[in-house]
Structure formats: structure tokens, C-alpha cells
Amino acid sequence: MKLQNMTQNIHFGGASGGATSPVTPSATFPGFPGSQQHQNELVMLDREYRHTLDDLKWAEGRIRELESQLSTHLIGSMGPMDVPDDPVCGLYSLKANNDKRRKGSPDELELQKMLKESEQLLTESTSNLLEPIEERRRAEFREKAERINENIESVSGRMVL
């Protein structure tokens, strides 16, 4: 409606400073943007604009509603969170938790020891994958490989027991 009122309030003033009478631009200039045809188009475009804005507001509201339903569903489907037995909040609690783990049962200590030993054997074996070319180093390489293989058999035998 504002656009329609604005286009209707266009006045052409005369040379005299007296009162002016409203003149329809379409009568004076047939192709002038203020003609009746253009006014009707402006009113129609304004109506379409308002309708589009209403649709946008409805769509935004619907999206918010669906997002809240999804969030509610996701939160409802989750179970309660478990608090860890030994929470770590800093360096001191980390050290305390590590000390507690070290004071485990003898079986756990033995398992930790074997785990460290197997990791060391793995790193040693990966560093010795290629046999050297020189004869003197070949003998050292073979001795080292035999020692690593014996240690691997020892660890795997202890794990079976």
C-alpha cells in the first residue's frame, strides 16, 4: 500500500508558486512509471513480496521445530553417561592413577611387563629387516636376529601359560 500511495502522491507543480493540482502522470506521459498499469504491477509485486516473507517465516519456524524434535529424540535415545572410575584432571591425578595401576595384581604386572617387552622386540625387529652386505656385519646381524627370535618365542610361551 505504501508504494501505491507514493505513486499517487506524485504532483507536477506549475511555474507559479501557487497551489498545485494533482495531475495523473499516465494522462500526461503514457509510458511514465506512475501509470495505472505500473501501479497495479507494484501492488501485485508488493503482495507477492509479503506472501514470500510469510512463507519464509513459516519455513524458518518449521525448521526450528524439526531441529528441536531431532535434538529431543537424540538426547532421549542416549543412555546415561558413565563417570570414569579414575578421572584425570591434571598432572597430579594422572600420576596418582598411574601409580594405582602399577599396584595391580601380579598377573597384571606380568602382563604389562610382557607388553613392554613385546613392543621393544617389535621395534628392534623392524630396525633389522635388511641383512647387511659386509661379511663382518652379517654375523652380528644373524646373532641379533637369533636373539630377537628367542625373546619372541619366550614372550609368546609366557603368554600361553
Image (cartoon, rainbow, N blue to C red):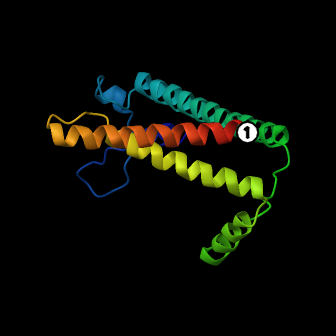
Residue 20 % position (x, y): 37, 49
Q: Quadrant of the C terminus?
A: top right
The structure residue drawn at horizontal position 53% and vertical position 45%, both measured from the top left corner, is: 118
Disc 1: which residue: 161
Furthest toward the bottom, the residue is 92
- For the point 34% across and 41% down, the residue is 143
Left or right: 159 as drawn, with respect to 49: right
Name the residue type under label 1: Leu
Specify whether 20 is left or right of 139: right
**Dot 1, how many residues are within 10 Å of its Cα: few (below 14), some (14-19), or many (20+)?**
few
How many marks the image carries: the answer is 1
The image shows residue 56 at horizontal and vertical percentages of 60, 34
Residue 68 point in image, percent of width and height: 75, 41
Residue visible at 30% across and 23% down? 30
The correct choice, above or below, for 43 with respect to 120 in the image is: above
Position of 84 relative to 58 (above/below): below
Of residues 6 and 48, the one drawn nearer to the viewer in this rendering: 48
* Pick the front one: 8 or 140: 140
**Splitting the image into 4 quarters, where does residue 95 fall?**
bottom right
What is the quadrant of the N terminus in the image? top right
Query: In terms of image quadrants, where is residue 17?
Result: bottom left
In the image, is residue 35 above or below residue 156?
Answer: above
Secondary structure beneath disc 1? loop
Q: Residue at 33% x, 56% y: name it.
A: 18
